[in-house]
Each structure stands twice: as structure tokens, then as C-alpha cells.
Image: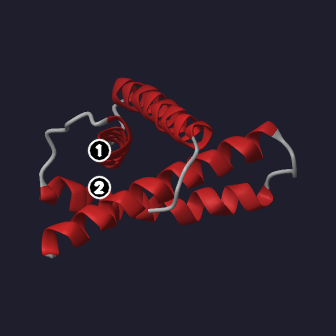
Amino acid sequence: MEILNETVKAESLKSFRSTIRKSENALTSMAAKGANTTLVAKRLKALRIGLAVLEQVWDGKPHPYTHEDLAEARILLAALLPSIEGIRAKSKLGSPQKTLLERRIKSLELALQEMDDSTDKDLS
């Protein structure tokens, strides 16, 4: 794991929390409209797991998730990256949206790395 300063850690946690809030709002809105919420619900769970993994590593907070939960979350979070990267590529340089997307990508990458590291530790 790379050495991270406290600012990067704080921004990553804040990014995850923001993404979770947005996903919760989307889920509520979709459910009210009678739309299929399966994918959003799965992504929301994966985001919560990603946040929990980072909080465990950085803050020592335990989480209740199993290895199966982590494996499923890892797949879903990794699948989010290409679409976020595509949106970032289309964003204007220096715009708040581009900054937000860069932080979101960084936070997802860090969570994925920690999930990989925890899997590697379990195999050894």
C-alpha cells in the first residue's frame, strides 16, 4: 500500500460518503417511481463495503462483512471505474466536477487495493 497523507485519506472517505448519499437518494427516488432498484441497491452495498474497508485500515474500525461480501463488492466497484473515468475525460480541466470525479476514482482505487491486499493476506 502506498503511503498516503491525511488529506488524501480524508478526501477519499468524504468522496465515498458523498457517493453513498447520492446512491441512497437515487435508490429512494427510483423506488418511489416503481423502477427496478436491484443494480443501485447492489452498488450501494458495494460502496458501503468499500468505505468500511478504508475505515478499517485507516481508522481501525471493524466491519461485519465476509470475504464473499468483499469479493462481490470488489467486482461491482471495479465495474464503476470505466464509466467514471469516461465522464472525467469529458470534464473541463480544473472544473469542480473533474476534481470530484478524480477524488471518486482515487477513493475507489484505494478501496480496491485494500480489498486485494486483504485477500492476499488471507491466502498467505
Q: Quadrant of the N terminus?
A: bottom left
Residue displayed at 56% across by 38% down? 6
Q: In the image, what residue type sits under mark 2?
A: Ala
Residue displayed at 32% across by 48% down? 46
Tag 2 or tag 1, which sits nearer the N-term?
1
Residue under circle 1? 49
Q: Is residue 61 left or right of residue 21?
A: left
Q: In the image, what residue type sits under mark 1?
A: Ile
Q: Quadrant of residue 26?
A: top left
Cβ–Cβ under 8 Å for marks 1 and 2: yes
User: Residue 87: horizontal and vertical position, in percent?
Assistant: 69, 56
Residue displayed at 51% across by 61% down? 2
Mark 1 element type? helix
Query: Considering depth in this image, is 63 or 74 the residue closer to the camera?
Result: 63
Query: Considering depth in this image, is 71 or 79 the residue closer to the camera?
Result: 71
User: Residue 85: horizontal and vertical position, in percent?
Assistant: 64, 61
- Residue 20 vs 86, above or below: the answer is above
Q: Quadrant of residue 99?
A: top right
User: Residue 40: horizontal and vertical position, in percent?
Assistant: 37, 43
Q: Within 10 Å of the Cα at label 1, are there few (<14), some (14-19), or many (20+) other Cα atoms? A: many
Q: Quadrant of residue 71?
A: bottom left
Q: Is residue 15 left or right of residue 64?
A: right
Mark 2 element type? helix
Q: Within 10 Å of the Cα at label 2, are there few (<14), some (14-19), or many (20+) other Cα atoms? A: many
Q: Quadrant of the C terminus?
A: bottom left
Residue under circle 2? 73
